[in-house]
Image (cartoon, helix red, strand yellow):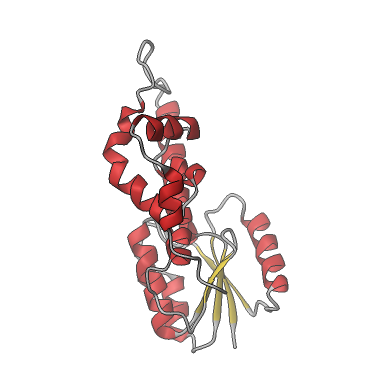
Amino acid sequence: MTVYYYAHVDSQDSAIELNLAKQYAQKHHLNIDQNIQDPESIKTNWSERKIGQIFKSSKPGDSVIIFEASQISCSTSQILEILSKASELKIQLHFVKYNAVLKNDTELTPTTHLLSVIAQIESDYISKRTTQALARRKAAGLPLGRPKGRGNKSLKLDRFKDDIKKYLSLGVSKASIAKLVDCHPQTLYDWLDRNGIDADKYLNMAELPVKA
């Protein structure tokens, strides 16, 4: 079995991430055989970068350790493609940040556990996009935040109503949902109360987590 560590060299915290990956590997009784550093733009499709090359040369039972999803793609749809391909090739795909692994004998089905990991990944993407957008505005000398005199209208959550209900039914915590819809947790709590949505009712309807 070969264990790969894959990293995008553009990461500002590459040394820290590598150290955490080594700790993760040791905890899970894995020895990193190859440290793959990829300089290719993250906007290039994953299949055309070194992660795609790893998949082509790997064998069933091999493992690929990645710090977080944004190291290998810039969208959730590509992540789903990668997870599906890893499952097809029977490769164990490890995400250090989420302490999650797609084992080579696991079917890519919409289980509560898998959806919870996808929710964490999407939350990361939202956070990164927001941070990058603010950085661009700051660099351009544009004002940050809402214009003066405009209230924080939590009615903006109305457009996420179906998504919020879906996340609740999957057992995703309210704090995590607030991150997914990009609002303060209290804003979400107030919105749930105003709309008469009983979060506990949805949580009780959620499927039990898949056993490891």
Q: Quadrant of the N terminus?
A: bottom right
Q: Position of residue 155 (x, y in %)?
A: 31, 28
59 w.r.t. 161: above or below: below
- The residue closer to the viewer here, 207 or 15, is 207
Q: Position of residue 176 (x, y in %)?
A: 49, 46
- The residue closer to the viewer here, 206 or 211, is 206
How many numbered markers are drawn? 0
Question: Image point 37% across, 66% down: which residue?
Answer: 80
21 w.r.t. 204: above or below: below
Question: Image point 40% across, 42% down: which residue?
Answer: 198
Question: Image point 45% across, 72% down: which residue?
Answer: 51
Question: Image point 43% across, 78% down: which residue?
Answer: 86
Q: Position of residue 101 (x, y in %)?
A: 54, 71
Res. 54 in view: yes
Q: Position of residue 81 (x, y in %)?
A: 35, 70
91 w.r.t. 46: above or below: below
Does residue 196 appear to the left or right of 17 in the view shown? left
27 w.r.t. 117: above or below: below
Res. 136 in view: no
Does residue 212 appear to the left or right of 169 in the view shown? right
- The residue closer to the viewer here, 192 or 35, is 192
Q: Quadrant of the C terminus?
A: bottom right
